[in-house]
Amino acid sequence: MKKKTVIIILAVVVLLHVLIAAFLPTPIVYGALFSRYDADAGETELSREKTEFASGKNVLTGYHYGAGDEKNGILVVIVPGFHAVQGDYSPVVGALLEEGFDVFTFDPTGCGESEGSDQIGFPQIREDIAACLECVGENRGFGCESVCLLGHSRGGYGVCCMLDDCEGISAAVSVGGINSAMEAVMSSPSNVLGKAGYLNYPGLWIWQAVLFGGGAVNDSAVSSINSSDTPVLIIQGADDGSVTPEVSSVYSHANELDESARVELIPGGHVDTLYTDEGVNADTIALVAEFFRKNAG
């Protein structure tokens, strides 16, 4: 056997070993990362109506909050972040009600009151949002003329990625949103291991593609925003250590966004740009309310 042939065979064998080593732990790690998330978000004094809807084989639980006499005809759908449930956003719901918006929010697959033995994976939020919007449509927008989306973290990624697929969305806001599924799942390995963390990139891509299809894995918030005419506001916390302004966030790709997208860098971290234990971030709510009124009112 020629020396060149031997070298090629050895190279292929080494490559296969590297790929297998990268892929084998992926289902285990991915399964642990997206295991079921149950949290007691506490009670709320806000008046609401429970609404259930199907996302794939699972039934999800959502709540509609009506603004009553202050109703301005705009329904805001709040999409929770990763490892969060709809009840975590009660301060945001209350503040939006005071601004005259109706609100609908829900627990994603594998979280809180919704069904699902696990959260399946990052792109699952897209399917949950699509199911939620179908439910909103079947309920005639809960009496509202316009529907807007407000997503946080994973929810911020989700609402942006829906814009080139869904009609009838008047405006969308992403707070601390992640740009893509691959950037999301690679953020932890790369933070811990540096460039060595990217050895698992092929395995993570293949596994997510098996679960959701390559299109869902490759899609990004930025590409969807640029493919849509829907007005979008990107809000990013300057001190966000989870989805940083420099890496993985929609904001980190701001130079790729069409000029029609509005981008705001504000003080705060990943969660307190939106709410804290003491209550809502009034500055953020003011930005969101003004944006929705301008584009959906």
Image (cartoon, rainbow, N blue to C red):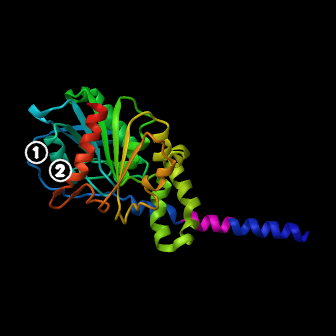
Specify the quadrant that holds the C terminus: top left
Q: Start and end of the magenta stretch?
A: 16-24
Residue 184 pos. (x, y %): 45, 58
Residue 22 pos. (x, y %): 58, 66
**What is the spatial separation of the Cα atoms under label 2 and label 1, in whole angstroms?**
8 Å
Q: Count numbered badges in the picture.
A: 2
Residue flagged by tag 2: what amino acid is it?
Ser
Residue 67 pos. (x, y %): 13, 36
Residue labelled with disc 1: 46
Where residue 13 is drawn, which disc sits there? none
Which of the marked residues, 2 or 1, is nearer the chain's N terminus? 1
Q: Residue at x 21, y 39 (%)?
A: 103
Which of the 4 image quarters holds residue 144?
top left
Secondary structure found at label 2: helix
Secondary structure found at label 1: loop
Q: Residue at x 13, y 42 (%)?
A: 98
Residue 18: within the magenta? yes
Residue 284 pos. (x, y %): 25, 51
Q: Is residue 94 left or right of residue 297?
A: left
Q: Nearer the viewer, residue 202 or 219?
A: 219
Residue flagged by tag 1: what amino acid is it?
Leu
Q: Is 265 above or below relative to 52?
A: below
Q: Can residue 118 be seen at all in this image of the molecule?
A: no
Neighbor class of circle 2 (other Cα within 10 Å; few <14, some 14-19, many 20+) is: many
- The answer to whether marks 2 and 1 mark residues whose Cβ atoms lie closer than 8 Å is yes
Residue at the far right in the pictured view: 2
Where residue 90 is drawn, which disc sits there? 2
Q: Is residue 198 left or right of residue 140?
A: right
Neighbor class of circle 1 (other Cα within 10 Å; few <14, some 14-19, many 20+) is: few
Q: Is residue 171 left or right of residue 211?
A: left
